[in-house]
Image: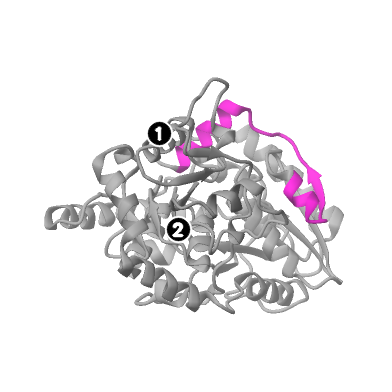
Amino acid sequence: MAAILFCPVTFNLAETTRMIQVARAISPGHRIVFQGYEHDYVELIRAAGFEYRACEPSWSAAERQRAIDFDQGRSFRSPFTRELVAARVGVERRLIRELGASAVVTGSNVTSFLSARAERVPLCYPVPFALTRPQVAQARRLYLVGGDGWLARAADRVATAGFRWIYNSVPLAPRSFTSVAKANGVPPLRTVSSLLTADLNLVTEMPWELAGFDLPDDFVPVGPIFAQLDAELPPIVEELAADTRPLVYLGLGSSADRKLALGAARALGEVDANVVAPIGHYLQPGDEVPSNVHVTPLLPAHRLGGLVDAAVLHGGQGTVQTACATGVPFVGMGLQPEQTWHVRMCQQAGNAIAVPPKRVGKPEFLGAVRRVLGDPAIRAAADRIARAYVGVDGAAAAARRIEAIATGGAVPGGLASGGRDSEGPASGGPLTG
């Protein structure tokens, strides 16, 4: 039996649920332990039956928003202070040792990239392909500039080249990581891509999304992984599905904000359709939405196939893959480059329309919603993609790879250098710098 430590960012819904799906697919003989710092979606982990360790230091609401802004490129102010990084690396190293963990599985908990390496434990990362080192190195366009005209395409190629140089070559990783890495005996992670590359990167994409890309040995395609919550749909969903008007699902995950949630809900009030919208976590007392928009608790979106006619999504990979698997055409609003990539891949496949979030409420947005509701070609593409998803189990494929490494299998390219030698745990040495 091996002990495997899962480290999601527990205020990120898609990431937490992706980790749960992988953990569920691990053979029962292994010990699974989750750890996290924030508490938003911890109950989903516990409800799935997994042991959970609450860790400190956690972020305040303001620090968490700063992290989201940093991730989405709205701010260059890093939330990762040296004190926070050092403390979290220390906590994680101690937990790895306590459990005798044979593998660490991270979502995007970036301190795992230091703590696992310092303890010489293989680090596995189920990860969307967008914004990985090989994707940024090889993609002609990252869709950093909106639009599809020749001028927009040319500008985006220039922006992509600049981003590629910055992401993969320039030493722009927060200095706190370089400092704490050195203190923990780990080679400095100076570029952004090196900070987000594990020993084994499990790429959560369908084959056509990787067409034309060459993957290095430490990047292994496993297929889509998305949430399948153990919950029933509330009665209102089936009631609305039985209505004569079409039904739209508004899914904004955990990386949107109140302004976008209200803007999208109010815009959908102008569409001749009913809407189910699990956006209550964004709203404040007194916020009003149109009468055709029904705010619900978090929904098991994988059960919506055959009930909803279209979706409006923020573009996170989990929501996009759920729509693909259930045959639901959608309008996607990428909130950051990774999400924009997911939406654009679906637009190219024919089952989605990309609309920038700043266009919500404009004629372009309303026209896109009406089109995904009524265009037979988009519906046919959604059906075709849903058929391709049948039988694909990315969580199971990822689990088998993780188990193999946890039980002594080879790590592609070997372990990154760190503080544990081949004979066992490191003795002495700084834990937190």
In this view of the protein, can residue 403 be seen by the observer? yes
Measuring 32% from the left and 54% from the top, which residue is drawn there?
354
Measuring 76% from the left and 43% from the top, which residue is drawn there?
91
Measuring 41% from the left and 38% from the top, which residue is drawn there?
264
Does residue 62 show up magenta in the picture?
Answer: yes
The image's colour scheme reads: one colour
Residue 196 place in picture, x, y as percent: 52, 55
Asked if 225 appears above or below 193 in the picture, the reply is: below
Asked if 143 appears above or below 216 in the picture, the reply is: above
Residue 141 place in picture, x, y as percent: 28, 61
Residue 6 place in picture, x, y as percent: 72, 56
Q: Dividing the image into 4 quarters, which one contains the N terminus?
A: bottom right
Q: State the extent of the magenta-drawn residues as a range.
A: 43-71
Residue hosting label 2: 309
Q: Residue furthest top?
A: 286
Q: Secondary structure at mark 1?
A: helix
Residue 349 place in picture, x, y as percent: 35, 70
Find residue 310 and report its image quarter: bottom left
Crowd band around label 2 with a 10 angstrom C-alpha radius: few (<14), some (14–19), many (20+): many
Does residue 263 show up magenta in the picture?
Answer: no
- Sequence-wise first label, 1 or 2: 1
Measuring 80% from the left and 73% from the top, which residue is drawn there?
27
Residue hosting label 1: 266
* Kind of residue at disc 1: Arg
Q: Secondary structure at mark 2?
A: loop
Relative placement, left or right, of 128 versus 136 is: right
* Kind of residue at disc 2: Asp
Find residue 430 and report its image quarter: top right
